[in-house]
Image (cartoon, rainbow, N blue to C red):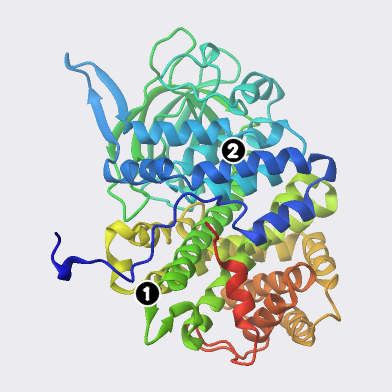
């Protein structure tokens, strides 16, 4: 018989064996709101299947194992031949295979594809975020390749395939491929025009030989990469295959894998090109313009990734509080804890609602929606990803000491939380990009104002925030130094307008009172006590 001191009581059960999609009411409603009704039944079935798989004990174990067993670099084989391969734990391949088969690289090839993929990405990456990187880059490579119709015709069917074909072979022999991206270099970072990698034209039209390096190249086991290099005509975009058509390995020397804060399951590397064969994508000197559509798509995925992580953090915090008792009752019923949970839930729902609105704009594809995305993507990338780490920290604290222990899964969420703010251009890059859109593309601001104007008159605090924002936009003095403040206000006004239109009154009221009305402290859990916080928390609760 076990000693009485070893009897375990008052511990929350693991959050496992549930439908991650169906438990996320904000996400379900976004899919129902934006997707063509004729596609809804099929999409619900797909996302429900994916949600149940994500919430299963098996998949959660895969996520843990992929992070406990990070990738390893093999530069040479046993005979001394250079191979430049990265070995991954089998759980990584299982996760990546499931993601590909779920259509997370196939948005461009089916109706409503971006919205369905966005919902799937938010659901699936709650199991493990690292393998989302190759899924994201493969998805995002498609619009860049369309700058060259012949290349797009050759590669797009492989990129949008739902078959995960593991191993390095010529792309023509594979049922599906993955892509990566190489932009930044040691000396330049985000200033890609300072790149020094040289592209020398070869005899065959459109082919080049690259010499140089890339400081960050994630997912180096991919089948191909879009990279930037200096051609005779200026900075240009190139496609670099890992394996050439004749079966020989292209020169792609992996110098080392980065030892990162989080994102441990994913291999991020430094690579060297030395006579590396490449195919030009787009015209010489237009590399940034060619690759910018890929960058925009990956920035949207950063928003999706942050929304996914926030949702999982909030789900864990609410689940724990619903089962843990202290001071004579459940934590979830305590007024102060309820305030914290409601505040976290607002941040998560606002992120999801905005992320899905962006996905709907991608599906629409019209001129008005493209103009809207030009402003909304950098604003969302800036703000939503920056909110991710505070949410992860506070959610972890809701579990107390249990949340600080690796077995809870919360430390992995915390380590992952800064990534989406840094990847694909950190905060200042996003803020400056938004300023460029304001200064050069007036149609982008007009589209944004029309969008938020749809909610005008529904909440006086939102109306006041829109008015204040317009006054700030009219004052261009010192605009760069206050760019972060401006981008934050744009993101909050946009989130508020969407919640006023689409969320339950309790959610919209709490968001506008705190984020737009000024009745909010400097930490989570400082919402006005008069709000209906119990309803907000219950809406966020995952039901197993």
Residue at 45% in and 43% down = 195
Q: Which residue is mark 1?
A: 397
Instruction: Tell me where residue 5 sits by quadrant.
Output: bottom left
Real-space CA distance between mark 2 and mark 1, rounded to the nearest whole angstrom: 32 Å
Whether 205 is drawn above or below 266: the answer is above
Instruction: Tell me where residue 440 sits by quadrant.
Output: bottom right
* Residue 340 or residue 238, whichever sits in front: 340
In the rendering, at what x and y percent does residue 222 appear? 45, 29
* Residue 511 or residue 276, whichever sits in front: 511
Whether 462 is drawn above or below 236: the answer is below
Instruction: Tell me where residue 528 sits by quadrant.
Output: bottom right
Q: Which residue is mark 2?
A: 104
Name the front one of labels 2 and 1.
Answer: 1
Q: Is residue 414 left or right of residue 407?
A: right
Residue at 57% in and 71% down = 345
* Residue 223 or residue 8, whichever sits in front: 8
* Residue 39 or residue 376, whichever sits in front: 39
Can residue 21 be seen here? The reply is: yes
Count of all numbered marks drawn on residues in the image: 2
Whether 485 is drawn above or below 79: the answer is below
Q: Earlier in the sequence, mark 2 or mark 1?
A: 2
In the rendering, at what x and y percent does residue 379 appear? 63, 64
Can residue 232 be seen here? The reply is: no
Mark 1 neighbour class, 10 Å CA radius: few under 14, some 14 to 19, many 20 or more: some
């Amino acid at each position: 018989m076990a000693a009485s001191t070893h009897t375990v009581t008052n511990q929350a059960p693991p959050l496992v064996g549930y439908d991650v999609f169906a438990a996320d009411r904000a996400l379900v409603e976004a899919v129902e709101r934006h997707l063509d009704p004729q596609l809804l039944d099929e999409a619900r079935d797909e996302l429900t299947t994916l949600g149940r798989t994500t919430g299963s004990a098996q998949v959660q174990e895969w996520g843990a194992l992929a992070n406990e067993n990070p990738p390893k670099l093999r530069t040479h084989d046993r005979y001394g031949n250079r191979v430049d391969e990265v070995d991954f734990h089998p759980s990584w391949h299982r996760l990546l295979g499931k993601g590909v088969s779920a259509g997370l690289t196939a948005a461009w090839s089916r109706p409503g594809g971006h919205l369905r993929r966005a919902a799937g990405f938010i659901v699936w990456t709650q199991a493990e975020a690292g393998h989302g990187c190759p899924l994201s880059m493969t998805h995002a490579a498609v619009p860049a390749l369309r700058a060259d119709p012949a290349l797009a015709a050759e590669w797009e069917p492989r990129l949008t395939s739902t078959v995960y074909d593991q191993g390095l072979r010529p792309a023509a022999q594979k049922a599906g491929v993955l892509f990566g991206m190489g932009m930044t270099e040691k000396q330049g970072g985000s200033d890609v025009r300072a790149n020094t990698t040289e592209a020398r034209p070869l005899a065959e039209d459109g082919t080049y030989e690259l010499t140089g390096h890339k400081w960050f190249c994630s997912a180096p086991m991919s089948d191909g990469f879009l990279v930037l290099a200096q051609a005779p005509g200026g900075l240009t975009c190139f496609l670099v295959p890992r394996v050439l058509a004749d079966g020989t390995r292209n020169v792609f020397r992996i110098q080392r894998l980065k030892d990162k804060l989080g994102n441990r399951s994913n291999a991020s590397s430094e690579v060297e090109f030395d006579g590396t064969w490449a195919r030009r994508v787009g015209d010489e000197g237009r590399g940034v313009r060619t690759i910018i559509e890929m960058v925009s798509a990956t920035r949207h995925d950063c928003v999706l990734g942050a929304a996914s992580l926030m949702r999982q953090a909030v789900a864990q915090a609410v689940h724990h509080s619903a089962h843990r008792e202290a001071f004579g009752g459940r934590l979830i019923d305590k007024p102060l804890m309820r305030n914290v949970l409601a505040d976290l839930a607002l941040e998560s729902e606002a992120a999801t609602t905005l992320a899905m609105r962006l996905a709907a704009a991608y599906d629409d594809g019209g001129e008005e929606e493209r103009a809207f995305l030009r402003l909304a993507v950098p604003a969302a990338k800036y703000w939503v990803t920056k909110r991710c780490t505070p949410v992860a920290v506070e959610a972890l604290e809701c579990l107390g000491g249990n949340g600080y222990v690796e077995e809870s899964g919360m430390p992995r969420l915390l380590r992952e939380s800064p990534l989406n703010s840094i990847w694909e251009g950190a905060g200042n890059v996003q803020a400056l990009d938004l300023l460029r859109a304001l200064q050069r593309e007036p149609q982008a601001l007009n589209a944004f104002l029309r969008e938020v104007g749809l909610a005008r008159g529904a909440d006086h605090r939102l109306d006041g925030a829109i008015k204040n924002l317009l006054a700030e936009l009219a004052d261009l003095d010192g605009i760069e130094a206050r760019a972060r403040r401006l981008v934050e206000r744009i993101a909050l006004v946009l989130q508020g307008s969407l919640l006023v239109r689409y969320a339950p009154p309790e959610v919209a009221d709490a968001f506008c009172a705190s984020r737009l009305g000024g009745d909010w402290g400097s930490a989570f859990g400082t919402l006005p006590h008069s709000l209906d916080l119990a309803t907000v928390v219950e809406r966020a609760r995952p039901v197993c």
